[in-house]
Amino acid sequence: MEKILDRFLRYVSVDTQSNEESESQPSAAKELDLLKMLKAELEALGVEVTLDEYGYVMASIPSNINKEVPAVGFIAHVDTAPDASGKDVKPQIIKNYDGGAIDLKGVPGLQLKPEEFPEMLKYVGQTLITTDGTTLLGADDKAGVAEIMNAVQYMVEHPEFKHGPVKIGFTPDEEIGRGVVKFDVKRFGADFGYTMDGGEIGELEFENFNAASAKIHVQGRNVHPGYAKGKMHNAIIIGQEFNAMLPVDQRPEFTDGSEGFFHLISFKGAVEEADFAYIIRDHDRAKFEAKKVLIGQIADFMNAKYGEGTVKLEVKDQYYNMRAQVEPHYHIIDKAVKAMEMAGVKAKIQPIRGGTDGANLSFKGLPCPNIFAVGHNFHGKMEFLPLESMEKASQVVLNIVSLFAQE
């Protein structure tokens, strides 16, 4: 078998950054480069596979046992976040990590330090994969892709491994909240699914944020500054005033656990006009709806103060908390916990402070909790992952398949 490390390194070498400004699907044509690669690899393994017009790779491995068991699916996304470049990723491989700071050699003086990221110390003696400081790594979610593909190769090359029907899905555009908007759950054919898109080893989530995006356009009034008194409306200042009216303690840097937030993700403009954008998150649906009401009230207030049409607000829901859809099928959580125990991993069931394709899939009728994909510090230059944890994640996939086969 190809080593999972080699597979992962090959996948992160492909730039698949999604584009939230695009209306197409996939949002960036370059995402198809990896999707086509995965389709070709599955075909080479003899697996039945399709790649449709929306960028969904769907593959099916038929059962090799003589009884009816549920079909189980595993899903991962190929795109990387718009937050940092995913082009020309140059991973660093740190064997037998000694617990010290790691130089990110693409940026002189930049280090990944355990005093800033103490979770690094959990992996002393293991192999860490880091960035070189110039890009993100892409473990979110190419680690998940590699883990699933590693398990697929094992099943194909070991016919003695007993399994029921197994479905594989790779998607684009998860990072911009559109990953499975057009995903055909019926055609996929799974009864239950798992996204391999979580964080550190042991994470297991079936509760996530309710999520929305908010885009704000501010139309200012530019007047020569020497004659601006009582006339100028500075769009930059109005935008700052808008942001200041949101509760400071509901910013991501001040929240944890199940607490929601407003996160300002972009701001650009000049005196005449400016555009800025937020993501809105909360696990509690009532609090989520209240956040959307609040941001609308602020927009109304600003228009009353500066004139109608000064602030234009567009809020779009992205996904909802999957708990209500997954909890009635708690046996799939139990299977994931057992599969981790079989791999020597202690499960940590917790709400995810984010979202996955599994949330929308759950509301489409495919209950789909989320399993660790083992990365840390996603979406930025400090991203890293331990190789041994990635190997464990792939083993968990096989263990889940085996447990379903025993039903």
Image: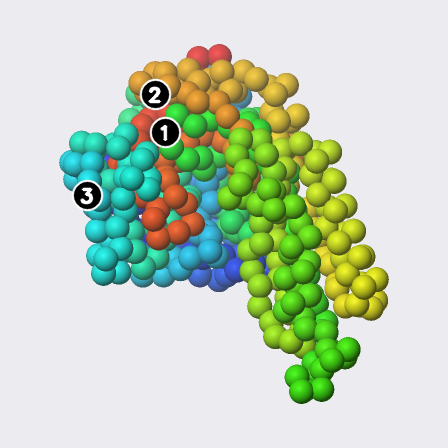
Residue type, numbered disc 3: Ile
Q: Which mark is residue 201?
A: 1
* Residue found farthest to the top: 407
Relative to 236, 43 lies left or right: left
Whether residue 248 can be seen here = yes
Front-most of residues 67 and 211: 211
> Badge 1 local density, few (<14 within 10 Å), some, or many (20+)?
many
Q: Quadrant of residue 21?
A: bottom right
Disc 3 element: strand
Q: Earlier in the sequence, mark 1 or mark 2?
A: 1
- Marks 2 and 3 sit apart, C-alpha to C-alpha, by 23 Å
Q: Position of residue 171 (x, y in %)?
A: 50, 46
Q: Earlier in the sequence, mark 1 or mark 3?
A: 3
For the image shown, how many numbered marks are present on the structure?
A: 3
Visual colour scheme: rainbow
Task: Report the residue marked by disc 3.
Answer: 94
> Badge 2 local density, few (<14 within 10 Å), some, or many (20+)?
some
Whether residue 390 can be seen here = no
Do tag 2 and tag 3 residues touch (Cβ < 8 Å)?
no
